[in-house]
Amino acid sequence: MPATDERPGLRSGVRVFALLVAAGFRRHSTYRLALLAGLTTNSVFGLVRASILSATVASAGAAVGGYDTGQVLAFVWWGQALLGTVNLWGFQEVADRVRTGDIAVDFLRPLDPQLVYLAGDLGRAGINLLARGLPVLAIGWLLSAFSWPPGPLSWLLGVVSVLVAVVAAFAGGFAVNLLAFWLVEIRGLRMLYTVLGGFLCGLYVPVPWFPDWLGTLARWSPFPAMLQNPLDVLTGRVIGADAVATVVTQLAWAGALLALGQVLLRRGRRTLEVQGG
Amino acid sequence: MAEPLTGPRPRPSRRSRRPDHLRPLHPYRVLLASRLRSQLTYRTSFATDVLGTLVVGLVELAEVWVIFHNVDTLGGLDFASALLVFALSNVCFAVADLLVGHLDSLPTYIRAGTVDAFYVRPLPLLAQLVSSDISLRRVGRLTVALVALVVGLATAGVQWSVAAAALLVLTIVSGTAVFAGLFTTAGALQFFVVDGAEVTNSFTYGGSYAAQQSQQVFPDPLRVFWTFVVPTAFVAYQPALTLLGRDDGFLPGWAGWLTPVAALLTWAVAATCWRLGTRHYQGAGG
């Protein structure tokens, strides 16, 4: 590469980002057995969840919270398919690097650490969507014929919505990891974030089924942007202008979480003290 | 420091004078005591962990509650009966998880080669692994389950009698054994699928999730699976029906007494798998 500029230009920056995405994709595609195991578990849980939620709709005798049987099945199976793609369980890698001081090496690299880790996570999401998500979706469709997105616009917005959900979930997890700059041990905090976030993002039951006060709480949190919103679009619960508004809300949350990560990263960089010689 | 080689030896206490073969449980007691002490040493960390498992329990409970916020009955059960099923299953799972849940970390031991150390000690491998850790932090989840159980028993309309009380105790003991058997089977399979540890989650955690439900929500093939293949229907749902003096037409009303049978069968499979697994293990080399 000709060294015309000290800083990476926009074009080479994008190229590096793409290379990092590809590297993340390859890194996570190495564990084939783990992907297969994840697929099995997602499918079994999908079967149990599909039984419970469709029994709920059957018991109500009408649509519950805007979901009829076909849509609630779509909610379950798209949700199971996106479980490996959207990283709702969070990660520990960045916190570990902060604790050991290795994060200093990340600061020396020409690309922003947040972008580097985001690229890796997008690669991880890609392989998980292909090797784990799509097969789960196929299994779900064979076992319980659910409703597909109601039109090309829903498909298109659905794809964008999933991508934004991946970014939002990453940005949230990244911000939690960065708290390691100030706290020695973030395991408990991570656990709380994962469990409460999992509930509020619609991992267990759809957010529109929540009682009013809990629904309001969820909607004022970033978590629905990580799962409930793409599921709203893909199940056809929201369509047209509403679907566009949903994706815009998601973009706002993803942007806010990325910005929070940048603030924490800058503050943390000043706090960081690496021992050694 | 090693003890001095000369000089008066401390007088052995009366207890320790008993020969070792009369105290076969002594090494386990020492191991466990040291484990428990180590967990309680870092108080803040321990408190956060307990809080964490408490929240996990509450969130699981919230799932049931949110569903019943939308409907009055699910799978033939009202909220109080569903709470009873949820609580019974969760008490059993929480105790099993507390006792043997750490068999989950077997792939880590296998990958790191630390299992070899267990092999060379003169105690059974499974007993060593089980006593190597008791995850005390999981009492958080157990607390939620116990409170839910008391509320469920009080409100669901249990017809109390000596038999009902006996069934309750029998169910909690055998239901715990069913989950412990599933965890052990899962652990045994780790010797074969080190990188695919998650595959066994489908019947340990998946089984626990299925056990919490009214089995009437499942389509027949799935119901047969959770009753006769992975017998988690006997952990909570069938005993709850018997306690309430009901049956759903799938199994007779007395089927709730069959939990010990389910536990025995689960343990037969677990023991076989464990034997095969430990013999399959070739060591990490080095």
Image (cartoon, coloured by chain):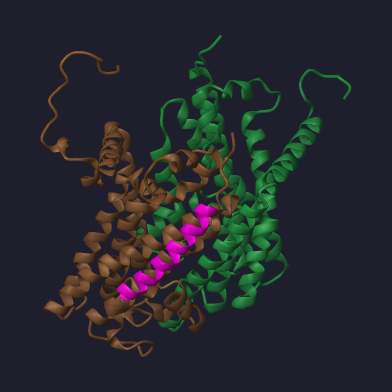
Percent from the top left, x then y, of residue B146? 23, 60
Can you see residue A164? yes
The residue at 69%/27% (across/down) is: A111
Q: Quadrant of residue A231?
A: bottom right
Left or right: B148 as drawn, with respect to A64: left
Can you see residue B69? no
Q: Which chain is green?
A: A
Hue used for the chain lettered B: brown
Q: Quadrant of residue A27?
A: top right
Q: Is residue A275 above or below residue A97?
A: above
Q: Main secondary structure of the magenta part?
A: helix
Question: Quick one: quadrant of the N terminus of chain A?
Answer: top right
The residue at 41%/68% (across/down) is: B268
The residue at 48%/47% (across/down) is: B106
Q: Is residue A106 magenta?
A: no
List the single residue furthest toward the bottom: B249
Which of the pair B142/A46 is nearer the observer? B142
Left or right: A155 as drawn, with respect to B37: right
Which of the pair A187/B131 is nearer the observer? B131
Q: Is residue B109 above or below residue B279?
A: above
Percent from the top left, x then y, of residue A128? 66, 53
Q: Which residues are magenta?
A: B259-279
Percent from the top left, x then y, of residue A65? 46, 71
Percent from the top left, x then y, of residue A254? 58, 44
